[in-house]
Image (cartoon, rainbow, N blue to C red):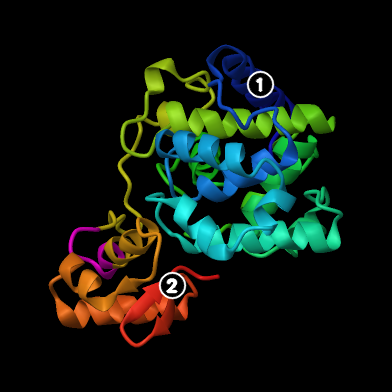
Amino acid sequence: MIGQAQRDAFQAQVVGWFDLAERDLPWRGAQPWAVMVSEFMLQQTPVSRVLEPFAEWMSRWPTPSDLAQESPGEAVRMWGRLGYPRRALRLHASAAACVEHHQGHVPDSIDELRALPGVGEYTAAAISAFAFNRRCAVLDTNVRRVHARVFDGLAYPTTTSITHGERERADQLLPADPPQAARLSVAVMELGALVCTARSPQCQTCPLQNLCAWNLQGQPAWDGPPRRGQTYEGTDRQCRGRLLKALQDASEPVDRSILEAVWADAIQRERALDSLVADGLIEPIEQDLFALPH
């Protein structure tokens, strides 16, 4: 349990810092569809890479209805090099669901949001909090790391999946007032992104340095499960990205010979091509011709 004094101090110090340090991001304070698009794009992708694609996406498709009228392939094309392109298909499917079931609007309840394609626990909570000022715990990687350091004295959470205890604690930390709770949620996320970072935490400038158990204990080294960075060069994921880009850049179906020129390893190329077809990201039109989905 977190005591009232500790909770009050946590809230006041984080929000006070955020009042001065908040980044001016285009999806903050925006309409719900913009918040939803940003949350899809920001999954496993840093803010700096999202800003330009987000602006282009919102300029072309300012409402769910606008996107739903397009083909899934156009969503994949506009996704560009953001990575994890299945997110584009799911966002397109979510836009269609908003049109079919919610009169073209993004729903505001957690249950209705969770029913949308590609919207999981975190994304539903984030949209509910940041688009509708609802009181709900928003737990992403940054927030979990801040909580682990401040309250557990650990450099990182001990599990990859969110525990029941983490959910309870996050809820206890929220103010009763929904708009204040939503502001605290985004403030903690911002603190984790800018100050309480994974590799180079700026503890000397952190507003929680006098509350943080990890900092007060001398920032003990991590002795939990090994934390392995993701590799990319030479992987199937890189191969998939190269093949998909060839189709994104083309206005007509692409011949297999063009894809062969993109990636030399024939076995890996065919494996990646098969997986792109299986994921619905590209379609075989006829023998040796491929296109984005229609």
Q: Secondary structure at mark 2?
A: loop
- Asked whether 160 or 245 is in front, the reply is 245
Looking at the image, residue 76 sits to the left or right of residue 184; the answer is left
267 to 54, vertically: above or below: below
- Residue at 63 percent across and 52 percent down: it is 122
User: Quick check: can you spot residue 231?
Assistant: yes
- Residue at 40 percent across and 55 percent down: it is 83
Q: What stretch of residues is rendered in magenta?
A: 232-239
Q: Where residue 57 appears, x then y in whole percent?
A: 55, 42
- Asked whether 211 or 30 is in front, the reply is 30
Q: Quadrant of the N terminus?
A: top right
- Residue at 48 percent across and 59 percent down: it is 76
Q: Where residue 219 appears, x then y in whole percent?
A: 35, 33
The mark nearer the N terminus, 2 or 1, is 1
Q: Where residue 78 appears, x then y in whole percent?
A: 48, 50
Residue position marked by numbered label 2 in the rendering: 282
Q: Secondary structure at mark 1?
A: helix
Graded by Cα atoms within 10 Å as few (under 14), some (14 to 19) or many (20 or more), the crowding at tag 2 reads: many
Q: Amino acid at mark 1?
A: Ala
- Residue at 57 percent across and 57 percent down: it is 162
Which one is in front in this view, the residue at disc 2 or the one at disc 1? 2
Looking at the image, residue 240 sits to the left or right of residue 161; the answer is left
Residue position marked by numbered label 1 in the rendering: 9
Q: Residue furthest top?
A: 20
Cα separation, mark 2 vs mark 1, equals: 52 Å
